[in-house]
Image (spheres, rainbow, N blue to C red):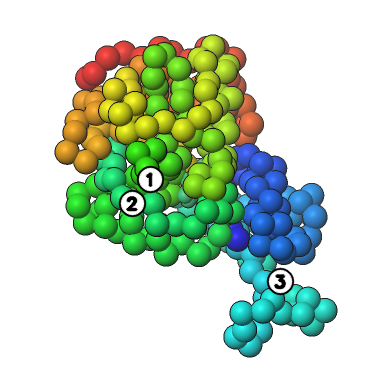
């Protein structure tokens, strides 16, 4: 199981939430965390501080440990789990209003039914993403039985009838931490949130589509297969992204202190 955590201004963002998800994922594969979440947080913060990285990410991976090949779990009295984490720099993302849109390419969802576990077994995701890229897209959109699940490495959301509609975590949807923050931001700005699956037809008539992940934050969707979804970031996506940036500032104390409401969207440039 693994986690990717963003560093802003030298501080990990939503570290507690990521470690909580790590623990749930580990439980999902019948593995105990080798250290408490508190100890892990302290050690991760120490590494981030030591690295002096300002804008970057932490990659953390926990496996059952090194042992000879066998389908049976190793004996935990002799084989200890392997936990590794490292930090690396990432370019700072452009301002919300300057983010380029993304193109989604529909792919059948060939993944297993425990996608809520953030597992390193990502072969269906990797194959789908590469196929999407080879078709000129940025992300693969997993659809099954007419329902939108999520993308190969991000959650997907729609603005329908003035509400944020977001497929809930479950068999085919990872409980994204950025999704969690997005929902918090939506409630903050008075946007109704409905956590439910939505269909292809609903997505086609959505006012705005967006995808979220730790490394991309919130990206507006400009194309979906051969359909133009939008020619610029939609007003609600932009407002949510501005609010997201304020949440980052508040938690990591980067940039100006967040005290004012986000600026509203201005149409296409
Ligand atoms: C399949 C999948 N869904 C959603 C996400 C978004 O999760 P988060 O916001 O925690 O990065 C990811 C991130 O890697 C992912 O791999």
Residue pointed to by mark 3: 81
**Label 2 – label 1 distance at C-alpha:** 6 Å
* Residue 245 visible in the picture: no
Q: Is 125 left, or right, of 5 in this rendering?
A: left
Q: Is residue 165 visible?
A: yes
The label number, if any, that marks residue 144 in the structure image: 1
Q: Earlier in the sequence, mark 2 or mark 3?
A: 3
- Mark 3, residues whose alpha carbon is within 10 Å: few (<14), some, or many (≥20)? some
| Chain-order first, disc 1 or disc 3 | 3
Q: Is mark 2 within 8 Å of ligand 1?
A: no
* Mark 3: secondary structure: loop
Q: Position of residue 133 (x, y in %)?
A: 25, 53
Would residue 142 be found to the left or right of residue 83 on screen? left
Q: Are marks 2 and 3 in contact (CB under 8 Å)?
A: no
Q: Secondary structure at mark 2?
A: strand
Of the image marks 2 and 1, the number of the one nearer the N terminus: 2
Please identify the quadrant where the N terminus is shown.
bottom right
Q: Residue 142: image x %, image y %?
A: 37, 46
Label 2 belongs to which residue? 108
């Amino acid at each position: 199981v693994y986690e990717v955590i963003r560093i802003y201004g030298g501080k990990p963002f939503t570290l507690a939430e990521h470690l909580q998800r790590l623990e749930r994922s580990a439980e999902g594969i019948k593995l105990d965390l080798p250290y408490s979440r508190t100890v892990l947080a302290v050690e991760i913060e120490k590494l981030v501080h030591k690295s002096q990285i300002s804008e970057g990410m932490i990659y953390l991976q926990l496996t059952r440990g090194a042992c000879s090949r066998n389908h049976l779990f190793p004996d935990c009295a002799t084989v200890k789990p392997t936990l590794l984490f490292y930090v690396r720099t990432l370019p700072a993302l452009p301002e919300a209003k300057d983010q380029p849109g993304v193109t989604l390419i529909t792919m059948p969802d060939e993944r297993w039914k425990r996608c809520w576990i953030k597992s390193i077994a990502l072969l269906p995701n990797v194959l789908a993403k590469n196929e999407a890229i080879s078709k000129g897209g940025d992300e693969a959109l997993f659809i099954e039985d007419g329902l939108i699940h999520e993308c190969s490495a991000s959650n997907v959301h729609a603005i329908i009838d003035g509400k944020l509609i977001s497929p809930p975590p479950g068999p085919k949807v990872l409980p994204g931490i950025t999704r969690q923050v997005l929902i918090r931001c939506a409630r903050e700005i008075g946007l109704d949130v409905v956590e439910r699956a939505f269909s292809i037809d609903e997505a086609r008539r959505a006012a705005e589509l967006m995808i979220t992940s730790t490394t991309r934050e919130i990206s507006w969707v400009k194309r979906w297969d051969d359909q133009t979804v939008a020619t610029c970031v939609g007003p609600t996506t932009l407002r949510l992204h501005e609010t997201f940036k304020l949440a980052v500032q508040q938690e990591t104390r980067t940039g100006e202190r967040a005290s004012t409401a986000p600026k509203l969207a201005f149409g296409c440039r």
